[in-house]
Image (spheres, grey):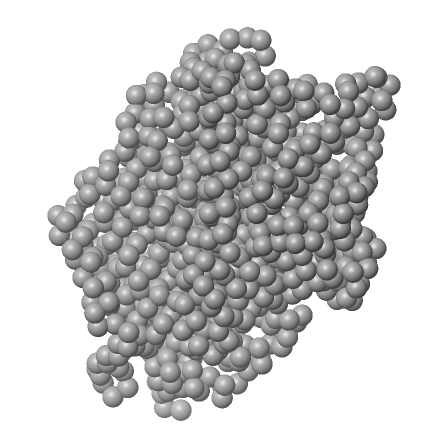
Amino acid sequence: MNSIFLLLNLLPILFLYQFGGDLHVSLSLTKEFTLSLSQTPLGTFFAYLSLISFLLVTIAQKSKKTSFSYYALQFLLSIAMLAIVLAGDFITFFIGWEIMTWSSYFLISKSSDIDTKSLQKYILFSLASAFSLIAGMVIAYSFANSFDFNVIQNSFHTMPFNIKVALIVLFSLSFFTKAGVIGLHYWVVDTYSKAPDLFSSILSAVMSKMGIYGLFLVYGHLVGYAELKDMFGVILNGTDFGYVLGWIGVITSIIATFKAITQDEVKRLLAYSSIAQLGYIIAVIGMGTSFGVAGAMYHTLIHTIIKLLLFINVAAIVAQTGKNKFSELGGLIYRTPVSFVMLLIGIIALAGMPPLGGFASKFMLYNAAIDSKFALILVGMLFSGAASFLYCYKLVYGIYLGHPTSKDLETQKEVPISYLIPQVILALLLVATGAFPGAFIKVINPILIEFSLNTIPYTSMGVMQSAVGNFNGLFIISAFVVIFVFILLLIWRIKSKAKNNLNRFDISYCGEVPSKNTQLHYGYGFGTDLYRIKFVNAILKRSSSPFYEALATQTKKTAGLLSRMYYGNIHNTMIIILLFFSALYFIGVN
Amino acid sequence: MIFQIILLIMLAYVVGFIYMGLYRNITARIQGRYGPTVYQTFYDSIKLFSKKNSVSYGWMFYLGPVIMATGAVLTLILVPVFSDSDFLRSVTTQGNLFLLLYLMVLGPLGNALAVGTGGNPFGVMGVVRGLTRLIGLELPFYIAVVGLIIASNSSDIVHIIDLQKTTGLNILVHPFLFIAAMISMVGFFGASPFDIPGAPQEVYSGPRTEFSGKFLALLMSQGSIFAFAKLVLIIDLFLGGADSLWMLVIKTFAIFITIIFIGIVYGRYKVEQAVDFLMKIPTLIGVIGLVRIIWFG
């Protein structure tokens, strides 16, 4: 079954490769409604991103027993996303959006540890996002008389100012919910952590990017960055609009980073980290400069690669050991060495360390902020980056380093090869994006032209141009490798012999000898320091759940009040229905 | 070029070790002790390199110190040491400040992996303290660096040095940024009050607890090379770089002695106190400098 769906997942990629480039198909339903697919450089980028991700996750699914309906829903989801990114009008976009919501809902419900509350959260927020989207669609339609993206784009500048603002806010809210901006992230963590392990990678790596695609579509294509600049004015070297989004993104990123550090469940940490990384993208997406768009695009790519890698890695470990908490794992490094190296590459990129692709994208993001002179936003991004080292280290330490916390961890074997294949591919991609950061500029430039922004000069594969200096990825990675090998050989040749394979209790432990019952794994105590720092404690003790809980309670009460109409006195119900219809009648007559 | 790189590493190695020796010596004299000789750390390093046995917990433990040393050497060759000469110019033009900010943390993170592999809870505790401290420690330094990048409109260090010839030294033009960066530097040098990760009486020697023999020697050597690189970075950014060996020694020593004198009079902070402090006063000073550049520059 796996191979059938592997081939099936390959088909859209081949289709896009063969017939893509300038795909324009439309199907008229009535005079006014037309379903159309229209390929843009932006859509093509996101289409390949999502399709290849699905392919890799399907490879990883081979060793996990998966039902036919799971595969079918996953395939449906990938097609829905294809429809979203290739849509040429809002009707097609919305159909894709709804299929995406529902197929992912059923996929999440297939998990063994999902509960009703998390499912309800997911579907409620998805519906809220869809309603916000549909409200925007209808308003846009009432002014442009068409759902077609190009028509809306052309008539946007003729709309009144408040309608423009309303449209931007409605669409932004819809896509922010999908991307999980702080405040609207309430569903993200529970859903990501309780979904089937491999599906979490799709949720974090691909589905959240549909929100980013939507933002690009609205800001870059429908509204246009030039129009945003005219509407809201200019601050420093960027737009007011970009400044506000910049702070939203930075605050999202900082809060989510601190929350991530204190999580004990592996997938919850990754979920928060996903929110934080998307915060970076949102911080630069509104700046309206070439570097802003390029930074957001590059980080979208890198984050997709990293999160696929990390979630697949964690899914493999959870499947192998049956444990998903840092306090229950540990010491797996020499049991599952390949997995360890893959996760290591993942976290080096996640932390934004130089030789790998993670740094290239961070470099672009920071340059975007410098280009707009948004200094404090840049400091915020750097700060959140520095804090993220902690959760990156927690991720690798909690699972692979330190001491095994239980007996069965000491006899684990390497995870099945089908989990490792996609990880190796993704890790190589991270190395490639780090060594050839300039190559991606060729992908970005057509998108910049589509948004009518200046293109970024391309010099060579290895060099990334920026506003205030260049990053030569090829040089850095080769210098790193040369120095690394040199020092390694040097230390290898030094005559002193290293005593290998010591017993793990042979450590210096205050002059005592730890016994088998001594707790030596530090996984659980990680991040507790943070609660004692006033500023961080202020962030950590706050949560959005009281607000949403209260909202839910109030809604239930209101609904209870309304339901009395039906369950109470039949006369009242009749009178209300009569009044309703007479009101409709009068409105209709007038 | 290879020859120049090796020469530079030798220079950093020697100068770094002498500074480390001076650090111990001066600290001792201020505390009323006689203290070790200036060359003591140098002797220690040679001795440790020639030890017959050292303890290792597998390949990751082996690679950790190597990654750390790689980070230090890469930082060293990317920081322009001499401002007006062609010394390693082809290499230093590839560096920029964002790259250096991240390279400076690469080594410690690489070493943290080895510490984790060793499995000593004290070592990991030290690493976690170090990373928590980093949250606060990086903040003023980032502000200073971002301020300088915006003020000189370039993240290229060679350009920042050249610009100081016309506008005047950054220490005078942007004093707030200098103060913020210097407070961070005290921490980067592991001086009090920010010497939290390797706090001897609390967590053994923190991240270094399990290392012995050639691994410890490598860690010490990279420490001195890295210290030199950080000093050169500071004088490049704020003191207009150095055009001769003598200027290099004088300027780096001036910065170095300031750090010693700040460090010696303070006791050690707890990690939360350190982060709290760093997030308040130095950050505020830095933000004042930054706002001055953006809105009134």
Q: Is residue A295 above or below residue B284?
A: below
Q: Position of residue B125 (x, y in %)?
A: 57, 26
In the displayed image of the protein, which residue is found farthest to the front? B3
Horizontal side of residue A9 vs B105, given as left or right: left
Horizontal side of residue A61 vs A502, given as left or right: left
Q: Position of residue A327 (x, y in %)?
A: 44, 28
Q: Position of residue A297 (x, y in %)?
A: 44, 63
Q: Is residue A372 visible?
A: yes
Query: Quarter-wise, where is residue B60 in the image?
Result: top left
Q: How many marks can you see?
A: 0
Q: Residue at x 60, y 76 (%)?
A: A232
Query: Quarter-wise, where is residue A139 in the image?
Result: bottom left
Horizontal side of residue A38 vs B168, given as left or right: left
Q: Quadrant of the C terminus of chain B?
A: bottom right
Q: Residue at x 54, y 71 (%)?
A: A289
Instruction: Compare residues A238 and A552 and report the one nearer the observer.
Output: A238
Instruction: Compare residues A276 and A102 and report the one nearer the observer.
Output: A276
Q: Residue at x 22, y 59 (%)?
A: A76
Q: Residue at x 34, y 18 (%)?
A: A407
Instruction: Compare residues A534 and A49 and report the one nearer the observer.
Output: A49
Instruction: Compare residues A170 and A250 and report the one nearer the observer.
Output: A250
In the displayed image of the protein, which residue is found farthest to the bottom? A590
Q: Position of residue A496 (x, y in %)?
A: 50, 17
Q: Is residue A499 above or below residue A259?
A: above
Q: Is residue A175 visible?
A: no
